[in-house]
Amino acid sequence: MMSIPKLAALALLLSTGAAYAAPGAAGHSHGDETAYGKPGDPKKPARLIQISMGERDGKMQFIPDRIEVRRGEQVKFQLRNNGELDHELVLATLEENLKHAIEMQKNPDMEHDDPNAKRLAPKKTGEIVWQFTKAGEFDFSCLIPGHREAGMTGKVVVK
């Protein structure tokens, strides 16, 4: 198993080559409906989906990394960082997350105050409540520089 400092160095190295994947600035949504849905209502019922984040065997990962939901369904993502490093989950379209990743390269300590994103310190928990209003395939990634490139990405399939 790779040590945490080596894993962090590998993630940083991997991130430098991927920084040019998509040009442009990141956009944030604050409560409005997006291409991938809208913030959920915590007072309404939601399907609970647990996602753990962490590092293992030289990779960074989400478990699970593929989720299926029905269009219109409200989901409560219960997040747990089981790793030794900070991680985040940012839910968006793939294009938006790739653009946002470039912004994160410039400002790696960027804090998210968005309903579709949550950053967690090691061994901490959090949640995102989201309603998927449109069918399609959407991305969730850890956009801390190097983490997505080290494997921290997943897909939500809305049917």
Image: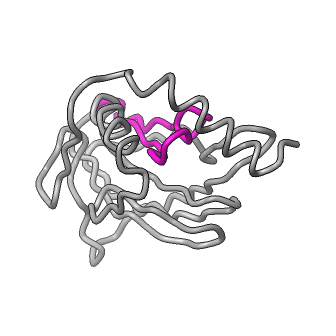
Check the picture and name the quadrant holding the C terminus.
Answer: top left
Residue 158 is a magenta residue: yes
Residue 111 appears in which quarter of the rendering? bottom left
Q: Residue at x 46, y 35 (%)?
A: 155
Residue 59 appears in which quarter of the rendering? top right
Q: Is residue 34 left or right of residue 64?
A: left
132 w.r.t. 25: above or below: below
Q: Residue 9 at x, y = what percent?
A: 68, 41
Q: Front-most of 119 and 19?
A: 19
Q: Residue 33 at x, y = what percent?
A: 13, 50
Q: Residue 114 at x, y = what percent?
A: 27, 61
132 w.r.t. 119: above or below: above
Q: Front-most of 41 and 73?
A: 41
Q: Give the residues in magenta.
A: 136-159
Residue 73 is a magenta residue: no
Q: Front-most of 56 and 106?
A: 106
Q: Is residue 112 left or right of residue 83?
A: left
Q: Residue at x 68, y 62 (%)?
A: 82
Q: Residue 141 at x, y = what percent?
A: 46, 42
Residue at far right of view: 1
Residue 115 appears in which quarter of the rendering? bottom left
Q: Residue at x 48, y 55 (%)?
A: 88
Q: Is residue 13 left or right of residue 71?
A: right
